Structures are given as C-alpha cells and as structure tokens.
Image (spheres, rainbow, N blue to C red):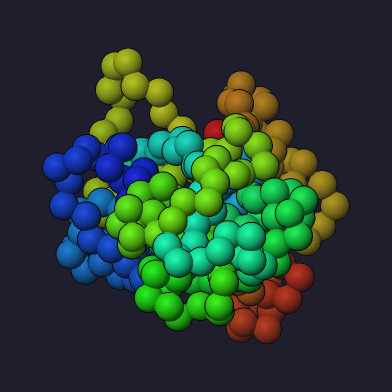
Amino acid sequence: GAYSEGAAVEYFGEDALLIPCATFDLVFEKLLSREADRAALPFENSLAGTIYRNLDLLVANDDVHIVGEIDFRVRHCLMTKQDTDTSQVKQVFSHPMALAQCEGYMKDRGLVPVEGFDTAGSAQMLSDGELTENAGAIASRRTVDLYGLKLMEADIEDDEHNFTRFLILSLESAPRNVPGIGYKTSIAITLENKAGALCKALGIFSAVDLFMTKIESRHRRSFRGPSTTGNGDVEDKIWEYVFYIDI
C-alpha cells in the first residue's frame, strides 16, 4: 500500500516481484546483497522537497547506479476505522512528507498532524487499533481496501500537481548511447572553502552547454566520507558541504 509500491508497479509492471522494506537503509542492503535486482526510492517531491536521507545513502554507496526515474502522481486519502465517527477525528498520523503535502487541508479543518513511520504503516497501525482513539491516517487509496478502513476524503493534497520523483537503482550501470533515449547525470561534488569555488565549478557546465536541472547543498556530516581538508577526520567536516547536481 505504500507509494513506493505504486511507483514500482507503474515502472516495472504488475508482474514484478516486489520486496517491501521497512527503511530506506534496508533497501540499499537488499540491493547491495543482490537480494533485489532493482530498487525504487523516492528522492524528491514537488511540494515538500528533497528526501535527503536517500541522497546521502546514494552518495555513501559508490556501487549503486541510477538507471531510471519516474514521476509518480501522489494522491493522498484521509481514512479512519470503520466504527469511527469522522466528526470526532482530531489527530492524523502519516509520514512527515505526506503530512507536509496536506498541511493546508489539515489546518483548515483543525486536524493535528502526528508523524508516523510511513504512510502505509500508519494505515496498518490504524486498522490494528494501535493509534489514539478517533485517529485518522493519510495514505494511498490502496490502503483503504487493503486494511479494511473507511475513506473520509480522497485527493486531500494541497496541490493537484503533487508528484514524487522516484529513482530506479541498480548495481549495474545503464547502457550508454542508446538511440532515442534521453540521459540525465547526477553528481555530488565537494569544494575547497574559498571565494569563487562554486562559481568556477558551475562555469564548466555552461562552457560545454550542459543544462543544469537541479542543485542543492547538504552538510557533509550527514554521511561518512573523506574530508577535503585537514587529516580526513570526521571533525574536519564541520561546515563543509556536498553539492548535489543534476545535468
């Protein structure tokens, strides 16, 4: 019932054998151990922004390649247990990203958002009676039927143009120079802390007429890797940054 499941089905088809994972870290573990051939992970939402944990995991695992992507339309539903009086619902549980995408809807109705582990997990906990009395959950339409819940309202996201970009990951790199296929490259760079360093780095793309579609910075202490200065200790990474760039 998770949105990752929906994106994987849309990309690979209904016949794909899917392996559910409780955490993003576990997805990488399954891929690196070759228990899975491919992985579909969310990296960016058009309303709530970047999922930084997955960017950090991608940079920290050099053997993992991006081999595809899909823009998945996310439609959120508010649901309760079958015996719940919907007028009494005050707290709504879901993943922080889903709550952020429905912030306006909940504010207008006086609903209190409560962060849960994930969307489908919140729906399952609601069904199992593990949440507070008269609670609701935000998840996909699939979870309503899957967990026997009552649909309060569908399409409650604040913007109908709500898409999540999922990247398809593999230990094998994508084939190159295939006619008729457009290619995108994602890179992560670190720079010396001096004037003009970023400007000079980005100038290379302009010089060779490459179109940059995304750039953002992330603190280097969010993942473990070599430092650009000093003796390489973790302490040297204070106030150092990684720049994520798509071209």
Q: Is residue 37 left or right of residue 156?
A: left
What residue is rendered at 37% in x and 76% in y?
A: 128
What residue is rendered at 31% in x and 37% in y?
A: 10
Tell me if residue 210 comes above or below residue 154 in the rendering.
Answer: above
View extreme (top): residue: 180
Residue 145, percent from left and from top: 32, 53
In which quarter of the view is residue 133 placed?
Answer: bottom right
In which quarter of the view is residue 126 placed?
Answer: bottom left
Q: Is residue 184 left or right of residue 89?
A: left
Front-most of residues 24 and 137: 137
Tell me if residue 90 comes above or below residue 64 in the rendering.
Answer: below
The quarter of the image holding the C terminus is top right
View extreme (right): residue: 195
What residue is rendered at 45% in x and 80% in y?
A: 130
Residue 220, percent from left and from top: 64, 68
Front-most of residues 72 and 219: 72
Residue 51, percent from left and from top: 56, 57
Tell me if residue 246 comes above or below residue 98 in the rendering.
Answer: above
In which quarter of the view is residue 226 placed?
Answer: bottom right
Q: Is residue 198 left or right of residue 215?
A: right
How many badges with numbers are in the image? 0
Residue 115, percent from left and from top: 60, 70
Camera sees residue 42: no
Camera sees residue 158: yes
Front-most of residues 141 and 60: 141
The quarter of the image holding the N terminus is bottom left
Q: Is residue 20 left or right of residue 231?
A: left
What residue is rendered at 30% in x and 37% in y?
A: 11
